[in-house]
Amino acid sequence: SQTIHQWPATLVQPVGSPLSLECTVEGTSNPNLYWYRQAAGRGLQLLFYSVGIGQISSEVPQNLSASRPQDRQFILSSKKLLLSDSGFYLCAWSVIREAFFGQGTRLTVV
Amino acid sequence: AQKITQTQPGMFVQEKEAVTLDCTYDTSDPSYGLFWYKQPSSGEMIFLIYQGSYDQQNATEGRYSLNFQKARKSANLVISASQLGDSAMYFCAMRETGDTDKLIFGTGTRLQVFP
């Protein structure tokens, strides 16, 4: 069966520090991969999505970037975090009739 | 442009009653899929049900059913026999399966089930 791993679950980082969140998928090939951010009590904002290795589409200009170095690996990065980058980050994969999420990373920038 | 709208910020329902959560969408792609998710206070996103744009029948999964009205571009979630554990945020989402493969979400509806 398919599983998705996202880590870490929580993260506290100082302003100006770098960020790397990783998401890996098992049990499926060539999935679409997505990164979302969710502010407290709000909906999911699509940040990046990828339909294949090295193919990244950015939805919102911001302080973040994404990479897909392998078929089932999706990385969200920042060189210098801002206070406004705080939030709940969710990774998801999708193939045809399914779309599943990782457990999420709660990022607090202090 | 691809768009998902959930107009109900909050809904209340009594235990054992049915409740309908509204979702409308807009897309120019004839091929798309519609999803519903439940997000409890823990934050995890739980997949509930899927409806493809070419599916002939409305999707059902246990107590969840999707009232798909293609001409009206609506995909409402019906929860039958509500339980206290159904209290959560519910999100509708759409994925265009033609050009972009983007998966976008509505703003969500908070459902509260009371005894």
Image (cartoon, coloured by chain):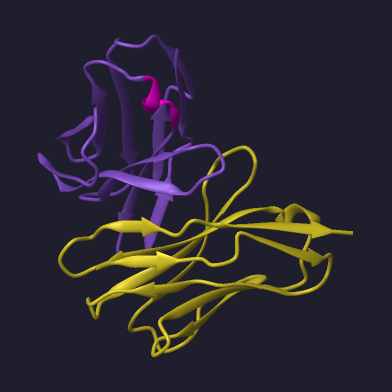
Chain colours: A purple, B yellow
A94 and A2: which is toward the camera: A94
Image height of A101 relative to A23, above or below = below
Q: Is residue B110 left or right of residue A54?
A: right
- Seen at 40% across and 86% down, the residue is B70
**Principal SS element in the magenta part?**
helix
Question: Dividing the picture into quarters, in which one does residue B80 lie?
Answer: bottom right
Numbered disc total: 0
Q: Is residue A1 visible?
A: no
Looking at this rendering, what residue extends furthest in the left direction? A54
Looking at this rendering, what residue extends furthest in the right direction? B115
Question: Dividing the picture into quarters, in which one does residue A60 lie?
Answer: top left
Image location (x, y in percent) of residue B93: 42, 62
Image location (x, y in percent) of residue A71: 18, 40
**Residue B62, magenta (yes or no):** no
Image height of A76 relative to A33, above or below = above
- Seen at 80% across and 55% down, the residue is B84
Magenta region: A83-87
Q: Is residue B73 left or right of residue B62?
A: left
Quarter of the image that includes the C terminus of chain A = top left
Question: Dividing the picture into quarters, in which one does residue B77 lie?
Answer: bottom right
B78 and A101: which is toward the camera: B78
Q: Is residue A77 visible?
A: yes
